[in-house]
Amino acid sequence: MRAPLLKKVLALALLTSTIGTAVAKVPVTGRRQFNLIPDALMRQLGEASYKSTLADVKISSGNENSQAIKSVGQAIAKAANQKSYDWEFKLIQENDTINAWCMPGGKIAVYTGLLPVVQNEAGLAFVMGHEVGHATAHHGAERLSQQLAVLGGMGALYLYLDNKSEMSNEQKAIVVAAMGAGAQVGVILPFSRLHEKEADVIGMMYMAKAGYPPSESIDVWDRMAKASGGGGTPAFLSTHPSEEKRQENLKDWMPQAKKRYERNKQSRNTQATLWTSSDFGGSSSSTRKNNDSSSGSSGGSGGSGGSSSGGTRR
């Protein structure tokens, strides 16, 4: 049997073997979904794509901003309760990029340009929850299932993992884009409106379970829209199509989110302004603003610290 035909037969066998386990239920919304890619394979793809993408950017580490990403991310990870995930949280030093993403398996990246838009820990928790929601709802697997014909079947995904030359750069870019980092690899493969609304709801529930006020999710989308008013569209919006009904959808789920929040809310003010645009005015190192005047409090990490009050909002 010739090699190309053998690859097609193996790919078909792999597809057939996954059909029986291809139907799953999306967390929170309960939607029944169908995809052909095993979760274990998606986690491998996520890890490989994460390493490849981070190799070409500057990582910001060892400062209060990167610690905030880690601590808020850990709170969201705990709420997501994915025992098979190997969580990682990285802050990418790109002040002009308003974006974040989460690869399957819990590989998260946030860009410094996003911080002045989310402004505070609660806003950051919603965006990170939204991105984690895409991963836990297996949206990337659904999109890759749709792209299998373009990629060349399941065998192509294994070629990607093995870094084989048979898979073109365009195909590799499609794999990364399908998992949510398309704007960074030059391929725009937007999530569907259904996926976006679903990730919004899941993200709001995760932030509420982590103790962050879900009402901040509405404010974040307002600030995202304002951020696009002065020029180019933020990457977070260009790859996450917005629509008027998104906030209405969040409001429909708000009563449930508030119940979760009341059971888990943190004792300090996570909506105090921590980041402003002046913090990221082209400087290579940025600091977080703590406008809280109370003593014994540091507006620092998302998972610990004393209570705070009186933080200003922009």
Image: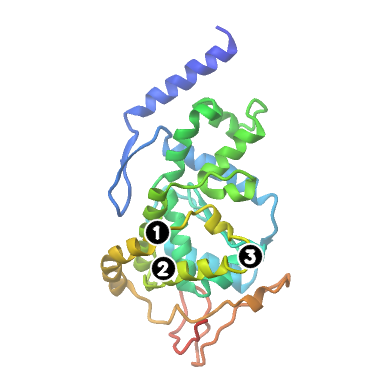
Q: Earlier in the sequence, mark 1 or mark 3?
A: 1
Number of on-image labels? 3
Where disc 3 sits, the SS reads loop
Q: Quadrant of residue 235?
A: bottom right
Amino acid carrying mark 2 in the image: Ser
The mark found on residue 200 in the picture is 1
Q: In the displayed image of the protein, which residue is found farthest to the top?
A: 1
Residue 233 in the image, given as x and y percentages of width and height: 59, 60
Residue indicated by mark 2: 217
Q: Residue at x 49, y 92 (%)?
A: 294
Q: Residue at x 53, y 74 (%)?
A: 119
- Quadrant (top left/top right/bottom left/bottom right) for the N terminus: top right
Q: Is residue 121 above or below residue 24?
A: below
Q: Are marks 2 and 1 in contact (CB under 8 Å)?
A: yes
Amino acid carrying mark 3 in the image: Gly
Disc 1: CA contacts within 10 A as few (<14), some (14-19) or many (>=20): many
Amino acid carrying mark 1 in the image: Asp
Q: CA distance from mark 1 to mark 3?
A: 25 Å
Work out whether residue 10 or residue 313 is closer to the camera in this orientation and state it: 313
Work out whether residue 243 or residue 177 is closer to the camera in this orientation and state it: 243
Residue 302 seen: no
Q: Is residue 85 left or right of residue 209?
A: right
- Judged by depth in the image, the label closer to the viewer, 1 or 3, is 3
Where disc 1 sits, the SS reads helix
Q: Are marks 1 and 3 in contact (CB under 8 Å)?
A: no
